Amino acid sequence: MLAIKNATLVMRDHYITNAVILLEDGKIADFGEARNLPIPEGCEVIDAEGLYVGPGFVDIHTHSDGKIFFPDDPVTACQHHMKHGTTTLLPAIYTGWNAEKQVEAANILRDAMENKPECANIGGFYMEGPYLNPDFGCDRTNNPWADGIFKEKYQPVIDAAGDLARVWCVAPEREGILDFILDCKAKNPNVFFAVAHSAASPQEIEALIPYGLRIGTHHTNATGDRPKYPECRGVCVDETVNYNDCIYAELICDSMGIHVDPYMLRLVRKIKGDDKIILISDAYACDGPIPPGYDGVDDINFDWEGEIAGSKMTLDISCRNMIKHTGASIVDVFKFASYNPARAVGFYDRGEIRKGLRADLVIVDHWMKVNKVILKGEVQ
């Protein structure tokens, strides 16, 4: 048994100060105020020294460690995120890769999950594509999926991803997208869907909610507009995600508010409420030059056409930026980076401090600087 003492436990809606938490057999055995929970004899003890102990971060959308894609070096990428508190992550398989490369990536990542202990924080795949709107996102010129939706082309990818595909991203406006969705569900009935890289109408998006669409991929990024009149703002993806209470909004929260302006972060939080916001790193690997006007940017990437290409962040940094930009509390950002993403993709055994759940924990200071990471009850 492992005991953590002198902890400030971060619960879903409050703190427990001067607390003890007991871990046994990879699960949370008990927790509470120290005066009510004596530490059993023979325990290994960690002194948190008053720091915050919260659930490990769950990054449902990340491509890399900021420099190298997961399929190219799963161990390095996984360990980078682990050191920053991410105990569960979904490596993204991206629309910019052709079918052969997507199948290869899925096979490499599956093998890493099964055979490399250093990759124990992989929880499945985030399938960012293949059928997105080719007019949006980075590296658009080389999109191999822009010609149309063909079963003989996509089925090998579905088969390779199998039940490890926890999320499939789609552009609902693509002709034939429902056939693709049904084939994804035939392979994995429990899969969820996200609207991504899209200019879909509210009606096109809402028509897919009954099939499991419940996430808005990197909300306000790579989304279109559909103005009805020249003088009016259109109603499109962002508005639909904001309007529908059942859809989670992913947010990339970089230090300078480039992906999402700080005012927009506060507005989305006000509209969606704290139960439907998900922080993601969307860490990508792209070494294009920093375009003019982005002086001082050091936590996001750019492609060779000057487009934003994801981030270089981990979720501890995203949480820190969210606190800075919105005034969110430690409780709030743990909800955005742990509880909400876990629930959005069906990880009901983690994401909060509760008896019987997986003992995935991170010890941080008041600015989310990581002190220790615990995965399944083991210090990493």
Image (tube, rainbow, N blue to C red):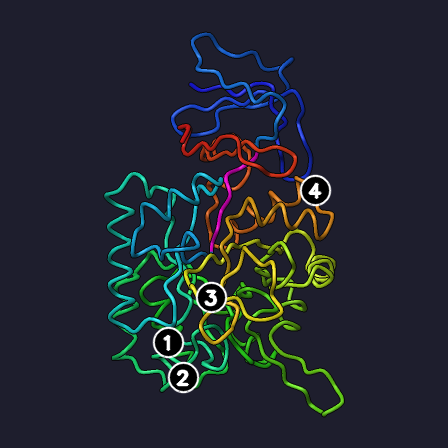
How far is disc 4 from disc 1 in space, using C-alphas? 41 Å
**Magenta-highlighted residues:** 54-60
State the separation of the CA atoms marked 3 and 2. 15 Å
Q: Amino acid at mark 3?
A: Phe
Name the magenta segment's main secondary structure: strand
The foreground one among 216 and 373 is 373
Task: Judge left or right: residue 151 versus residue 133.
Answer: left
Residue beneath the point at 29% across and 56% down: 72
Do the numbered discs 4 and 2 sit on residues whose CB atoms are within 8 Å? no
Mark toward the start of the polypeptide (3 vs 2): 2
Query: Which residue occupies 28% across, 61% down?
Result: 105
What residue is pinned by disc 3?
Answer: 193
Q: Position of residue 2 (x, y in %)?
A: 45, 20
For label 2, the SS is loop
Q: Position of residue 128 (x, y in %)?
A: 42, 67
Question: Distance between the Cα atoms at labels 1 and 2?
Answer: 7 Å
Pointers 1 and 2 in contact (CB under 8 A)? yes
Query: Under tag 4, what secondary structure?
Result: loop
- For the N terminus, which image quadrant? top left
